Image (cartoon, helix red, strand yellow):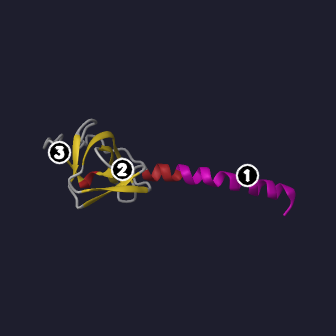
Amino acid sequence: MNSDDLKLSRRIQNLVPLVVMLTLALLVLVPAPAGAVDKFVIGDRVQVSAASNNVRDAPAGTLIGSQPQGALGTVRAGPVVAGSNQITWWKIDYDTGTDGWTGEGTLTNSLGRSHQ
């Protein structure tokens, strides 16, 4: 390889992480469909309805903890549709334990309200 080939190879290697990050961002974070009604709104009180509930650092991100069935919390952000299964995620400030992003399917509105 000559020096120009080496320079080009290094430039390409430097771009790979950026290309990967941008591709993942485009594939993972998808806005909710137009006209969709959200299950929750910011400030809603929610309760874990599943036997166990994973808590993640970001929508479809790294697992950082869990919450038991019946755990209560407050919606702080969302919704974000992300991941290969296109799950809708909400950022929850739980009353106790780990706070973070939780899949919508394991949560109910603790006051029985529905925004749909």
Q: First in sequence: mark 3 or mark 1?
A: 1
- Earlier residue among tags 3 and 2: 2
Tell me which corner region of the image, top left, top right, bottom left or bottom right, holds residue 61: bottom left
Name which residue type carries label 2.
Answer: Thr
Label 3 element class: loop
Q: Which residues are magenta?
A: 1-22
> In the rendered structure, which amino acid carries the disc numbered 1?
Arg
Residue 86 picture location, percent across and down: 35, 55
Q: Nearer the viewer, residue 101 or 82?
A: 101
Residues at marks 2 and 1, CA–CA distance in whole angstroms: 41 Å
Residue 110, disc: 3
Considering the image in quadrants, where does the N terminus appear? bottom right
Residue plotted at (45% across, 53% down): 27
Identify which residue, 2 or 90, lies in the foreground.
90
Rendered position, 62 above or below 30: below
Q: How far across and how far down the image is residue 49, in percent? A: 20, 55
Residue wearing tag 1: 11
